[in-house]
Amino acid sequence: DNSLPFMTLVEKKLRVIEDNIEVFGSDPSVFHCCHEDEQQENGLLYQDT
């Protein structure tokens, strides 16, 4: 949703990192930025599968 304030997007990104901090700390490259998916509520950071 492009109407979300910038800080809301930042907070959503940080929440994804915090929720996956062990994975992110051991290998940050498993996360990547991509276009926001309306099906996902976790901002612009997605874990590669």
Image: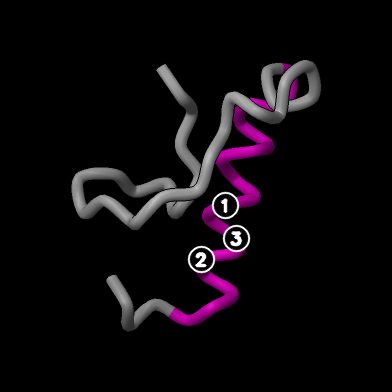
Residue 31 in percent (x, y) is at 57, 33
Query: What is the secondary structure assignment of the residue under circle 1?
Result: helix
Q: In this view, does 14 lie above or below 28?
A: below
Q: Are marks 1 and 2 in contact (CB under 8 Å)?
A: yes
Residue 42 in percent (x, y) is at 42, 46
Query: What is the secondary structure assignment of the residue under circle 3?
Result: helix
- Marking on residue 46: none
Q: Do the residues labelled 3 and 2 touch (CB within 8 Å)?
A: yes
**What residue is drawn where x is 53% and y is 39%?**
32
Q: What stretch is highlighted in magenta?
A: 5-22
Task: Identify the residue at the far left of this view.
Answer: 39
Kind of residue at badge 2? Leu
- Predominant SS along the magenta part: helix
Residue 10: say if magenta: yes
Residue 15 in percent (x, y) is at 60, 45
**What residue is drawn where x is 44% and y is 53%?**
43
Kind of residue at badge 3? Glu
- Name the residue tied to disc 2: 9
Colour scheme in the image?
A: one colour
Q: Do the residues labelled 3 and 1 touch (CB within 8 Å)?
A: yes
Locate the N terminus and report the quarter of the image it occupies. Answer: bottom left
**What residue is drawn where x is 41% and y is 50%?**
34
Determine the image quadrant of residue 39: top left
Residue 19 in percent (x, y) is at 61, 31
**What residue is drawn where x is 33% and y is 56%?**
36
- Marking on residue 11: 3
Residue 9: say if magenta: yes
- Name the residue tied to disc 1: 13
